[in-house]
Amino acid sequence: MAHTDQTTRRDLRREIAGTIGLLTDEHDFRAMRRYRSFSFDDHAAYLHQVEALLKTRAAQGTHTTIALFDPEEYAEFCTGAGLDPDAPASRSRFTAELAANGPTVPYEGQPLADLLPVLVDEAVRQATWEYASHLLAHLGSCTTCGEDLGRAAFTRASRLLLRVLETAPPGNRHLVCSVSGSPETLVSVLHADDELDGTPLIDEAEALEFTSVLALGLATHSPGGLVMRTSTPNGPDRIHGWRLRGYGLEPLTAGEVFDAYCTDVESGDLIAPESNVDYCAPPDLGDDHRSPGHHH
């Protein structure tokens, strides 16, 4: 009977998914060392132990997700929930919250060194989306037509992104949207890889963040731009670009795209162009990209 109970518990452990809150850099690790119950004293050794645990759980058939553990957010969480931050149970509670609402990536056997930048990128993506969405939600209504400015801009940005993808040459596309503002410039990245039928395969979370950043630039008439790089197996990469202008996208000439890519932002010095890359004027998006008629 005991053997059966042990077997049952082992089978149940395989059914339980877990989340590990990871301290990705030395600065955050040092911040957690102020808690006496946090027993690690070396970040490299800590990461080694985490990776060993991940491998063990994977070998047992247990699924694990990795969440970005932020010590400042943890302290705020404990204050708000009335928890003792110097307690493992509080860290577990916070990690459970991260699993539900924070940036996470699944562990699939990859080296931890490869997983860390993916997790950080995911955290940046979510923070960018939350910030852009917050600003869009507080733009208010148009004084002329009463339409919600943030919602209208998001709809507009969605249509523009769709036109960019529809008119793009075949291939795998890497899009970057940047919007200048205060306190900092927002940058969002979107990957769109062709499926067998030619339709673009995009990540919904990436697309949501990208559209929100583009919408914010349109709604606030901020300086910004959109660049798309298309790659194919048997030809040169093609790079197109647009600047945000008014409530739409204004195409860059091939020369302007070349200048943007081959000029150092800091010094203004020329940079040698990449090999096997064509700097091109973008495809025509149609009249809609100029936003005829009333716009905000």
Image (cartoon, rainbow, N blue to C red):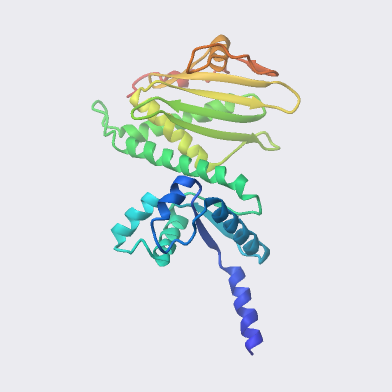
**Number of marks in the rendered image:** 0
Residue at far left of view? 143
Point out residue 207 in the picture as x, y percentages from the top left corner. 51, 37
Residue at far bottom of view? 1
Residue at far front of view? 41
Which quadrant: the N terminus?
bottom right
Q: Which residue is drawn at 71% across and 37% down?
A: 196
Looking at the image, residue 51 sits to the left or right of residue 103; the answer is right
Q: Which residue is drawn at 52% across and 53% down?
A: 42
Looking at the image, residue 253 sits to the left or right of residue 58; the answer is left
Point out residue 60 in the picture as x, y percentages from the top left corner. 66, 67
Q: Can residue 212 be seen in this view?
A: yes
Q: Residue at x 62, y 81 (%)?
A: 6
Image: 113 above or below 91: above
Point out residue 270 in the picture as x, y percentages from the top left corner. 56, 11
Residue at far right of view? 234
Image: 175 above or below 19: above
Which quadrant: the C terminus?
top left
Q: Nearer the viewer, residue 175 or 9?
A: 9
Q: Residue at x 47, y 30 (%)?
A: 159
Point out residue 295 in the picture as x, y percentages from the top left corner. 34, 23
Which picture quadrant has residue 274? top right
Q: Is residue 70 visible?
A: no
